[in-house]
Image (spheres, grey):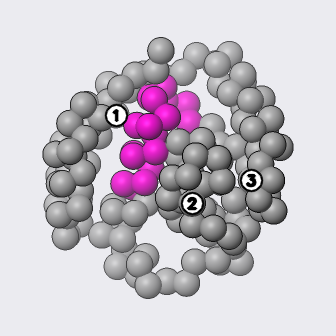
Amino acid sequence: MSFTPKFMRSLRSFDRERRALRTAAEWYAFRMRWFDREKWPEKPRDQIGKELTEGHQLVSEIRDGRRWAPGIFTIDITPEARYHYFWTLNTIGQPLLDPRWSTIKKSPETGWRQECGYCFISTQDQGEPTCPRCGRELYWQWVAE
Ligand SMILES: [Zn+2]
């Protein structure tokens, strides 16, 4: 069974705090307080291989006209926790670290993709702002170097 990080056990306080963050310094303190990553376990290697196979199967069944790719996260936390973790990093943290993040034009041509951290799938094709599989809000991630 996957690990449940502490922020998932205090989701209401966690959410209230993350939405109140206004500066990079506040973000660093928040990240230290809530994302105790050293306590999050690694997945066994055979599980990672199995999940990648399942991920390819999953994206092959999506019929929304976009091309999706499965992702792999080697840390063994629940899908719900993974969604909150990546949503928070990309939607709250990155804009505080780089003020251009919120206003920059995000497109596949400039290295951006949209991801669902619950299903752990991503696409570079533009489309609906929600995940075709679970309906959660997709967040933007910058992938180009
Ligand atoms: Zn999803």
**Do labels 1 and 2 touch, CB within 8 Å?**
no
Q: CA distance from mark 3 to mark 2?
A: 13 Å
Q: Is residue 16 left or right of residue 135?
A: left
In this view, the mark in front (1 or 2): 2
Residue lying at 55% horizontally and 31% vertically, measured from the top left:
74
Segment tinted magenta in the rendering: 73-89
Image quarter hosting the C terminus: bottom right
- Label 1 neighbourhood size at 10 Å, few (<14), some (14-19), many (20+)? few
Please say whether residue 2 is visible from this viewpoint: yes
Q: Alpha carbon of mark 1 to alpha carbon of mark 2: how far?
A: 27 Å
Give the mark, 3 or 2, whose residue is nearer the N terminus. 3
Residue 42 drawn at (x, y percent): 49, 23
Seen at 64% across and 77% down, the residue is 107
Residue nearer the viewer, 127 or 50 = 127
Can residue 25 be seen? no
Q: CA distance from mark 1 to mark 3?
A: 28 Å
- Determine whether the residue tagged by mark 2 lies in a helix, strand or loop: loop
Residue at screen point 70% across, 43% down: 70
Question: Where does label 2 land, which residue?
Answer: 130
Asked which quadrant contains residue 94, the reply is: bottom left
In the picture of the structure, the residue carrying the numbered disc 1 is 37
Residue 9 coordinates in the image, percent (x, y): 24, 31
Q: Is-magenta flag for residue 51?
A: no
Q: Position of residue 87 (x, y in %)?
A: 43, 54
